[in-house]
Amino acid sequence: MDRLGDPRGRRIPFSVEFSPPRDADAEARLWRAVRVFERLGPAFVSMTYGAGGSTRDRTVRVTGELAEATTLLPVAHLTAVGHSIDELRAMVGAYADRGITNILALRGDPPGNPLGEWEQHPEGLAHADELVRLVRDLGDFHVGVASFPEGHHRSPDLDHDTRFMVNKLRAGAEYSITQMFFDVEHYLRLRDRVAAFDAEQAAKPIIPEIMPITSLRSARRSLELSGSNLPAALEERLVRAAGDGPEENRAAVREVGIDVATEMCERLISEGAPCLHFITLNFARATSEVLTRLGIEMPAPAAQPA
Ligand code: FAD
């Protein structure tokens, strides 16, 4: 496994998040990214779980292909949205049939409007801790959960948020992956809160999620959906880079986005983060640029036979 260097000579792993491709073109693009990351050696690759039957079928198929046709270790996200308990059991079984035993157990958001009212399926689950237990009871699965450095938008306060996050770890989750954030202090405070609440559970890895910004417009959309915030100084830098023309200056925004992601990773490494998890949107370029700046080199392609 390739690991990132840190100033003390210790090396930490990185991982990447993919999303289910919507059509054949998107699937081809995903596979191009997969092949790049395969050479960079992530600790694992995670595949998000969307709403809608056809997307779900494609997600299971493609995640299965990642397990079968690559050297990568897939982690399948699974949400309780719109599923009865029997359907959730069947989904876990479908992943297990394809050799996937790593599941990120999530409650999910209401389809269509992620910030709208959550409605539990009449025969389903209310919260992610129940899904953790369900998956663990089904067999020898490794289960992770979500955590929220700025607090989940439905939590009344950070104390409740920490308590519910620790509940998921106590239910059997082995690690958490955070929501994206742009101020490393939020991540460090989450770690402190968990340590103060339950020292034993705090030993489990809290993996920070990094989104290298390549477009101000799409970053704003992701922030809106995630409930995360841009620090004012960073927003100002990005707005200045985007310019005031009819189209944002993507190259300049990207430059700032890559600089900021690299600086955040350097700080996270020096603060002892256990792994760096990158949102890729199924593109390899921005993440591999950050990795290169952090000192991980892309191996040269194998020589082609004459
Ligand atoms: P929960 O842990 O159930 O928390 C939901 C809310 O309820 C929180 O406010 C929590 O504090 C509170 N709560 C938790 N347990 C209890 C309890 N027992 N009693 C009362 N309140 C409780 N969404 C997708 O649709 N697909 C994905 O693939 C996906 N991947 C994600 C990956 C990561 C790393 C992250 C951080 C989020 C992801 N999401 C995904 C979004 C996620 O599903 C939403 O943020 C969702 O609103 C919360 O999910 P959860 O698993 O944290 O839910």
Image (cartoon, rainbow, N blue to C red):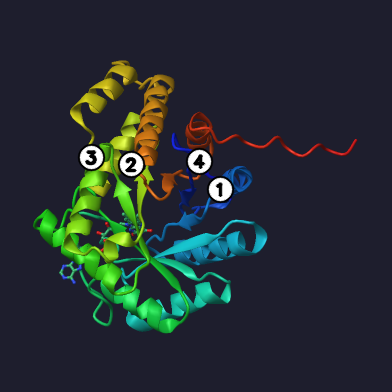
SS assignment at label 1: helix
Q: Nearer the viewer, residue 301 or 110?
A: 301
According to the picture, the residue beneath numbered tag 3 turns out to be 185
According to the picture, the residue beneath numbered tag 2 turns out to be 271
Point out residue 154 in the picture as x, y percentages from the top left corner: 15, 58
Amino acid carrying mark 2 in the image: Glu
Mark 3 or 1, which is nearer the eye? 3
What is the distance, in whole Å, between disc 2 and disc 3 at their CAs? 10 Å
Amino acid carrying mark 1 in the image: Leu
How many residues crowd around disc 3 within 10 Å: few (fewer than 14), some, or many (20 or more)? some
Q: Quadrant of ligand 1?
A: bottom left
SS assignment at label 4: strand
At 39% across and 83% down in the image, what residue appears? Answer: 137
> Which of pointers 1 and 4 lies earlier in the amino acid sequence?
4
According to the picture, the residue beneath numbered tag 1 turns out to be 30
How many residues crowd around disc 2 within 10 Å: few (fewer than 14), some, or many (20 or more)? few
Q: To which quarter of the image does residue 146 belong?
A: bottom left
